[in-house]
Amino acid sequence: MKRNKEKPEGRTLRQDAALLWRALKIWDEIQPRFWLYGILAPLASTAIPYFGLFLSSELINELAGARDPGRLFALAGIAVGGGFALSVLSRMLEGRKEIAQSYQWVKQEEYLNRAQNGFQYEHLEDPKVQLLRSQIFADSNAFGGGLIYVYHAFPGIAEQLFRILLSAALTVSMFTLRADGTSSGLAGWAASPAAAVLMAGLILAGAAGSVRLESAKMTGSQEAVFELAECNSRVAVYGSLWGADMIVFGLNRIVTDDFRRYGLRPEWVRKLGKVGEKYGSLLTLLRAGMDLALFLFVAAKAYLGAFGIGSFVLYQGTVSRFVEAVGELSGRIGGLRNNNRFLAQLYEYLDLPNNMYRGTLAVEKRDDLDYEIEFRDVSFRYPRTDAYALRHVSMKFRIGEKLAVVGENGSGKTTFIKLLCRLYDPTEGKILLNGIDITRYRYDEYLALFSVVFQDYMLFDLPIGENVAASPDYDGERVRASLIRAGLGEKLAALDALAEERGTRAAALAVGRGYDSEGIDLSGGERQKIALARALYKDAPFVVLDEPTAALDPIAEAAVYEDFNRVARDKTTVFISHRLSSCRFCQRILVFDRGRIVQTGSHEMLSEAEGKYRELWTAQAKYYVGSQEE
Ligand code: ADP
């Protein structure tokens, strides 16, 4: 499946505003200070040049006019003191803003993580959702596409709005102040109301022109963003690739080629440069024309005494800033609209339907672990597939029993467990807990009944204790007991010695070196025992081992299962394997074949009867001859 390279959907301004509004609401939720610094910091920094401009013009007016020393000193004092105070305030707010901004990425990740945790499992297995997720991460990491962009654009927009307001406010007097004297000729005409209207029109036309040019520039850079987005989703993958295969097979040829194909192509980099040059020179031309008109207008009015020559400096500054800010504002709004494509992508992800019914019944807490689960004629098809992965499965778990689920790969064993843990709901039939449909229970309480060690169990490069307890807080003694019961007693003694040397405890040693260069290396078997210890630590009434031992040889797997059988004590334990020998100690064995339970019984019973079990046993026996024979 490929990244969706469609050009931006023609959204209306209203739709764009709605997308943006939602992003602002998200920031408001995850980092409320964002508003405060996003508005106050630009307000302070924008005020500085206007303050300076205004006071310089007043000073010049005074120098060219009355030259009152008291007033001159006062103005100079305000200019210096006020400028200083504003700069200090602005620097302080900018500093705060930057600190707040440095959390933005973590805040965003935390938000996405929280949202994901509420997703139903089905989405995790959906390739379309996986692609969407990796695009969101790639775009956000590479150029802040999405929420981060909004975060950064917001103060910029506020800044341009303040510039426009301040410029306009300081420019008004240019039109309203009237000269006392009259004059004929060009200067007289320039000071007339008609000239004022014409000048105002020219300024607005200049602003409109700069908006047009900015938006044309934006269209050009939009193309660049699309190209970059494609490049980035690939770079995000390749950036993390490094391994022996890259060297032995020279796989980096593919990577290099991909960079050439999807990377920054010179022709459109050149194109982008040309777009910038063309609009840059048009803008300069436009501004030069406007400046000339302004010069004539202001000079004439100053000449006729409408205002002092200092104001000439002020108006020159405010008008050009006004035009510039209007253009900048439109450019930034264009940037935001561009970015909306990434927001739309993000919302598509956040809004994935969560239509799994979650009931409200509490699961009774029982010390006697008297939880009876029944599959009643359960059939199941994975979403987007036609074939049934489970068909008419009916069975009951007996409390405290050691149950085996065996069958060839693809026969439905894992699917059976996914339904048991309610990662999916049956397509037909029902699963009942103590006689009540499991969908009617609270989901979290139902999940609390299970400890499952999956084939692809996850360990983080975090301290052993955290991995075992699945929590940053753990009970050290319970962690140790679980590790010992999972068969890591000897290893633990060695780790104790190492921990003592380092002045810490064994449970605090990190598994792997992802975050800690002093983390410990564990073999595959040891890692798996940590996963088993986690299952024991949770102390749930049901424990399921879904072939976490597949990487071991059959004999080692059987040994792990038998050991686990001994420590699982009163729990209802389900052992899953495609190797029959691993499970033959179980009192009851369910044999799966193409989604059905085809046989049930003990190893002795099943190996004597005609059927799938004996067929598989005979086929597999050659691996164990001499070691497993009865
Ligand atoms: P087992 O655990 O016995 O190896 P599974 O329960 O994993 O078997 O698979 C049973 C069937 O369901 C297989 O045909 C498999 O291809 C299919 N299947 C498993 N997972 C998915 C999925 N996420 N989406 C679609 N089909 C799946």
Image (cartoon, grey):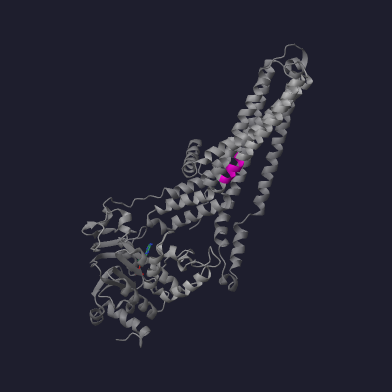
Percent position of residue 434, x then y:
22, 59
Q: Which residues are magenta?
A: 93-99
Q: Residue at x 23, y 82 (%)?
A: 608
Q: In the depicted view, which residue is nearer to us: 362 or 383?
A: 362
Percent position of residue 101, x then y:
56, 46
Q: In the depicted view, which residue is nearer to us: 214 or 133?
A: 133
Q: Quadrant of residue 129?
A: bottom left
Question: Which residue appears farthest toward the bottom when viewing the image?
Answer: 626
Tell me: residue 75, above or below residue 374. above
Q: In the depicted view, which residue is nearer to us: 571 or 410?
A: 571
Quadrant in which the C terminus appears = bottom left
Percent position of residue 249, x then y:
58, 72
- Looking at the image, residue 366 sits to the left or right of residue 507; the answer is left
In the rendered structure, does residue 97 fall within the stretch colored magenta? yes
Tell me: residue 213, above or below residue 7. above
- Looking at the image, residue 293 sits to the left or right of residue 370; the answer is right
Residue 487 can be seen, yes or no: yes
